[in-house]
Image (cartoon, rainbow, N blue to C red):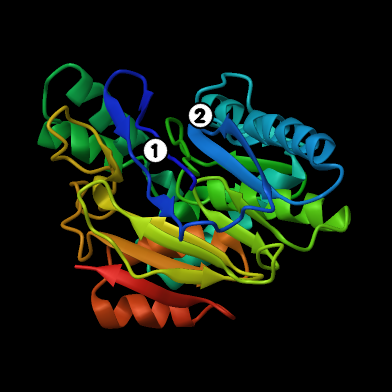
Amino acid sequence: MAETPRLTRRRFLTVAAAVVTARPGWATTAEVWRGQALGAQVTLYLAHPRAPELAGRVWAELARLEDVFSLHRPGSALSRLNSDGRLVAPPFELVECLGLAGAVHAASGGAFDPTVQPLWSLYARSHAAGQVPRAVEIARALALSGWRDVVIDPGEIRLRRKGMALTLNGIAQGYCADRIATLLAAEGMTDCLIDTGEFRALGGQPAGAAWPVTPEAPDGARLPQLDLRDRALAVSAPAGTTFDADGLVGHILDPVSGLPAAAHWRMTAVTAPSAAIADGLSTAACLLPPDRARAVVAGFSGAALAGIAA
């Protein structure tokens, strides 16, 4: 069983991501390795004679990726972009992940919008001080959003307006799972499970069965078991991260109104060949009505809305 403990990102955020529960005895032939990356527990299930060496390489790669995507490391590529408004010679991974984020943004009609970081920061600061953001503050933060003002080129990324900032919290964990899968596949791994907060399966269990994953949300919502084989799974729950101590103000913000979204679902689960795409789509799906959510997900090759909890 992969445990996901409650973590604290600063003192005003409580993170309780979906967890994996498993049938008794599954993955008994795989070694389990645990660590931390991007504010979440990372769990690897590996069955390989070189498992300790490969796990070490995974942790090194995740540390490198944190230097690209972390909002809590001042020297990360993303932090430097947000601080300076431009980043010359950006890492390939940042360019690629932003391209995927742009595809989900366009398909979802803007429901998935990485430019909401100023709004997100406003809510975090306000609730840390025991306050609710004022309408004028929300309007000011919304004025700094807009994906059309993000210029992405291999040689430079620019934010056209001063004060803009990006967050990739809704896609970077999935992207990291994909990168780790690529690393392990290059080493000949065929039967392993990667859990970065989103899941990526290479093959199935070493014994031959698929990886059984049962998503659960912090508020008790639960989806039926999903069997993964050569596939990714991402789960989003509005109550998974809350700004307030009472757990009432969810982290998924409406990029149009600037208010905590009245989410259509307590939890969504999306499967796809890419964990990054599944990650972004599961976030967007929380903000979309049923038919629209299904249509947006179906627009990506091999993706499926695998489960919803109303």
Q: Quadrant where the C terminus lies? A: bottom left
Disc 1, SS: helix
Bin the neighbour count of mark 2 within 10 Å (Cα to Cα): few under 14, some 14-19, many 20 and up.
many
- Are the two marked residues, 2 and 1, in contact with CB atoms closer than 8 angstroms? yes
Q: Is residue 218 left or right of residue 232?
A: left
Q: Is residue 166 above or below residue 151?
A: above
* Residue 155: percent from left, percent from top: 77, 44
* Residue 135: percent from left, percent from top: 11, 37
Q: Which residue position holds label 2?
A: 71
* Front residue of 77 and 8: 8
Label whose residue precedes the other's in the sequence (2 or 1): 2
Residue type at mark 1: give it: Gln
Q: Is residue 225 above or below residue 98?
A: below
Q: Quadrant of residue 35?
A: top right
* Front residue of 277 and 96: 277
| Residue at left offset 20%, top offset 59% | 263
Q: Which residue position holds label 1?
A: 117
| Number of numbered tags placed on the structure image | 2
| Residue at left offset 68%, top offset 50% | 30
| Residue 78 shows in this picture | yes
Q: Is residue 9 left or right of residue 171?
A: left
Q: Is residue 244 above or below residue 169?
A: above
Q: Is residue 49 above or below residue 212?
A: above
* Front residue of 248 and 125: 248
